[in-house]
Image (cartoon, rainbow, N blue to C red):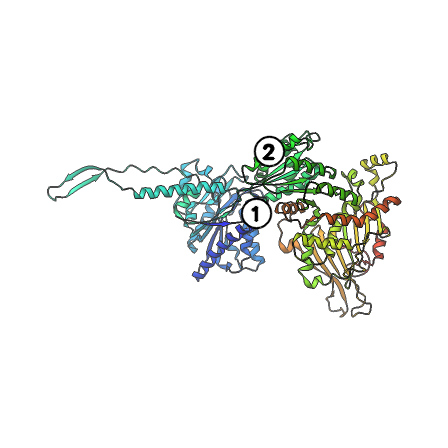
Amino acid sequence: MGIERILAASETDFTVKSVDYIEECILKFQHDKERGSFVLGLAGANGRIRRARLADALACLAARRGVDWARVYVFLVDERYGFEREEDSNAWLIKDALLKGLAKNGASFPAEHFVMPDTSISPIEACAADYKDKLLALLEQEQGPHLITLALGQDLHIASVFPEWYQASPERWAEATRKSVGVLCTETSVFEVRRRLSVNLRVIRKAENIMIFIGDGTEEAWTRVKRAFDEDRFAERKTKRARRTIEPSSVMLSVETGVMMVHAKGRKAVQPEPPPASPLDYILKYSNVSVVQLKIDKETHCSLVVLGAAGDLAKKKTFPSIYQLLLGRFLPVSSAVIGVDDPTFHPDVPDADAFWERRLRPYLEKEKATAEDLQEFRGRLSFVPVRMSDAEMVQALDRHIRGLCQGRTKDNRVFYLALPSFLFASTVRALKTHCWSSTGFCRVIVEKPFGKNGVEAKELSDSLKDYLQEPEIFRIDHYLAKTLVLNLLTLRFANRELGHLFHAHHIANIRVTFKESIGVQGRAGYFDSYGIIRDIMQNHLMQVLTLVAMEAPASLQAEDVRDEKVKVLKQIRPIDPKDCVIGQYEGYQDDPDIERVNAKRGHASRCPTFAVCVLYLDNERWSGVPFIMKAGKALESQSTIVRIQFKKAPSGSLFGDQPQNELVIRIQPNEAIYYKILAKMPGLTQRAKDVQQTVLDLDLKKRFELRRTPEAYEKLIHDVIQGESHNFVRRDELEQAWRIFDPLLHALEQEGRVPETYAFGSRGPHKADALIDRMGFRRYTVTGVPGFAEDDFD
């Protein structure tokens, strides 16, 4: 029989071409036949990566508008039995990705058209018998199946027909290939949920169309199956060409009839063929199949090298993000993850096994990982102890990376420096000298802080410039990759009517607020030398402010966007110390680390844990509009919000004295955009002018039904691999941001200003609210009365 091969160039292309094929089969059936329903059999998937791929395809299928879903039945080709959580079942996957999507898009799909096993029935044999009856009734009624989708596993299984199961007993293979419809009770030792239900191979053979998914990781398995198929076809053609001869056992001539009678020898009993290496061998022998195959780049290898791998940042943020990229299929197919750290400081992690067990595994298990997912990540992970001052050790790291490339022609390397900034220059020098790829790109990620002031930042940039070009440097500011920060350009420039409101004609003030409910526990030593202004305002909040205030870029190319951000930064005045209030929460001085620092200094720490600053832009769009920046620790809640407060209507306006409208962008938690506007109050006793502030709300998780919002570090690491620099800080951005804050920091330190004390868990110092009030910001409750609002007050 034949094989149609459909190549996909990328994950997106893989999804689209798979869905195109399914849709084409359904539409052809519904066009050719006025009556009857299309029967679609869907196999599940094992492992989080492959289940996510299947979910993407089903969600894409649900969005297709041409199909009459009232004339479609869907049944499960296989199901897990004895799973702990409903989310682990194949039925849940189909319901969540396909059926929810259909309902959301208004498609009519009767609930009874989804046929699945009732896994609450025990024992498994009774469950299989019950499902067989339901399946037989469906297939006889609709003369199906018309299409079955399958994926080939690395162990050569399809559906849940595992070679290890049927090769253990000839009776099992006979059961799998029985000529009538059946449901098998199979087992596997490879996956977490071991007991399975699967239709037998006769059901699959009956399908008019069979589609096989071949993704990354199963290419070698497919090559083995295809080779066996080609060999069988060659042997079959050779056999047909050979002449068949009959060896007579006796020849007798009848005198009466003159007829010669030849008696052939009796045939020997035919021995049954041994079961094949894969059940797909059997399917290919009797059926035509279409194979959707992800094209694998066999020439490129990418190494993600994390320096400072044994530290807190790496284990809490960097490695979990790389792990999620692997699960989401966003890492290159040929890629390796390499942890590097100095054995002098981390003697407890001498090798990869110790690194895995003592540093990574406890944190990755928090990511809702399955055993298979962890095993897959562990297979890509290695650890190399290196002192960057030791040239031989750095050269050994280079040899290790080259060994992982396995002869591929492109050796791409991403170096993530999870290190203190004073080590950046010496580390980059060692890498450039002894561990640089000559056959691919090398990119270096550096973490904040980028110095304590403009002078240090310039010196740091100059030291990196000695070894790296600017396009090779990726300065991480994780706020730039938060979902709603990424949405700011879209909000302003894709919605023209809204974009026009971003102007001094309409806006009274803009607030950018960062709140943390925790103190500085565990970071007191570091934090005390930087303070809230350097730690949060000069980088995170300033980046948010530039996206709110910038003009439309010439294009969405990285350099055009960053050029506009720099223009905005150049137009911001240095902050006047009079427009700043700093605070420190009660109990800060009692931290053991702070007590030690105070003992050395001889006086109490003046480090601000809270600050409010007012900034002004000298341009026509924002002339006279105060940008109020607020950040603090140990406050009453945890959030990051951009609040744009529009100008108040004149007192003699049609509806009188009413609250100001606000556009609120909640960056975290629970990402949302909402517009606070006035609306007529309902009720028989209400007058025409009785209005109340209400909310037009866009909750991103609800609207887009996000199963999981990617972490900012995932987005940024993926951007580096892709060479996408939109969401990283360019050198001139960094220097301009320091120009704005340096005079303020210098003035505060010169005058020795003592921070205002505020209670742990409060809103901050009272003087901060007074400064904000002076800038024209007004607070409103849900009833429109000035005061402290309970819904979203910041």
Query: Residue 644 lies in what quarter of the image?
Result: bottom right
Query: Residue 685 lies in what quarter of the image?
Result: bottom right
Q: Position of residue 752 (x, y in %)?
A: 88, 44
Query: Residue 34 lies in what quarter of the image?
Result: bottom left
Q: Are the two marked residues, 2 and 1, in contact with CB atoms closer than 8 angstroms?
A: no
What type is the residue that disc 2 sits on?
Arg
Look at 62% across and 50% down and name the residue there.
Answer: 707
Label 2 Cα neighbours within 10 Å, binned few <14 / some 14-19 / many ≥20:
few
Look at 80% across and 64% down and name the residue there.
Answer: 648
- Judged left or right of residue 307, residue 34 is left
Q: Which residue is mark 1?
A: 52
Looking at the rendered structure, the secondary structure element under dot 1 is helix
Residues at marks 2 and 1, CA–CA distance in whole angstroms? 35 Å
Instruction: Give whichever of 662, 445 is nearer the camera.
Output: 445
Label 2 vs 1, first from the N-terminus: 1
Furthest-front residue in view? 466
Q: Which residue is mark 2?
A: 399
Q: Position of residue 124 (x, y in %)?
A: 49, 42
What type is the residue that disc 1 sits on?
Ala
Label 1 Cα neighbours within 10 Å, binned few <14 / some 14-19 / many ≥20:
some
Is any part of residue 185 visible from this angle? no
